[in-house]
Image: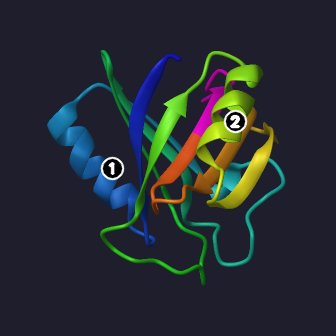
Amino acid sequence: MKAINVYLVFDGNCGEAMEYYHKALGGEIFKMKFSDAPGGAPPGAGDRYVHIAIKNGNVLLMASDNMPGMPFTQGTNYSVCISCDSNDEVDKLFKHLSVGGHVHMPPGEQFWAHRFAGFTDKFGINWMLNHEKPMQG
């Protein structure tokens, strides 16, 4: 396991929020809009961000906008994100942590990850398990 980080979700103002945090945290910022993602943007999501990351040394803050029309509740708009070393680690953690919960995305390859899974555990905590590919851009 490489790291455990918080992943924030915003309702269309991810870019503004992350620029604000970047001014405070410094470091490098990486941004990708839904319209820049492989396969194009879902309807209404083109100007929203699929991913923003701020990295300064060992500090990593990640975020995205939610999809238009998806439920959004301020105060629960975060996930615990584990950066995994391998696909096997994603699968092992998923098998244990997702029991009794609700799976949003089962383990599988994504354009940003060799393997990714997203779910809410039986205690109501949102999780992201990510064996990432190198960031481009």
Q: Quick check: 16 above or below 96?
A: below
Which is more toward the observer, 92 or 80? Answer: 92
Q: Which numbered dot is residue 67?
A: none
Q: Name the side, left or right, on which 35 lies relative to 50.
A: right
**Which one is closest to the eye, mark 1 or mark 2?**
2
Whether pointer 1 and pointer 2 mark residues with C-beta atoms closer than 8 Å, the reply is no
Give the amino acid type for the residue marked by disc 2 in the picture: Trp
Task: Estimate the spatial distance between the alpha carbons at disc 1 and disc 2, rounded to whole Å.
Answer: 19 Å
The mark that comes first in sequence, 1 or 2, is: 1
User: Which residue range is magenta in the image?
Assistant: 129-137
Which residue is painted at 33% across and 74% down in the image?
74
| Residue 13, horizontal then vertical, whole percent | 38, 67
Q: Quick check: 42 above or below 137?
A: below
On the image, numbered disc 1 is attached to which residue? 18
| Residue 11, horizontal then vertical, whole percent | 44, 72
Give the amino acid type for the residue marked by disc 1 in the picture: Met
Q: Which numbered dot is residue 112?
A: 2
Residue 136 part of the magenta-drawn span: yes
Residue found at the very far left of the displayed protein: 24
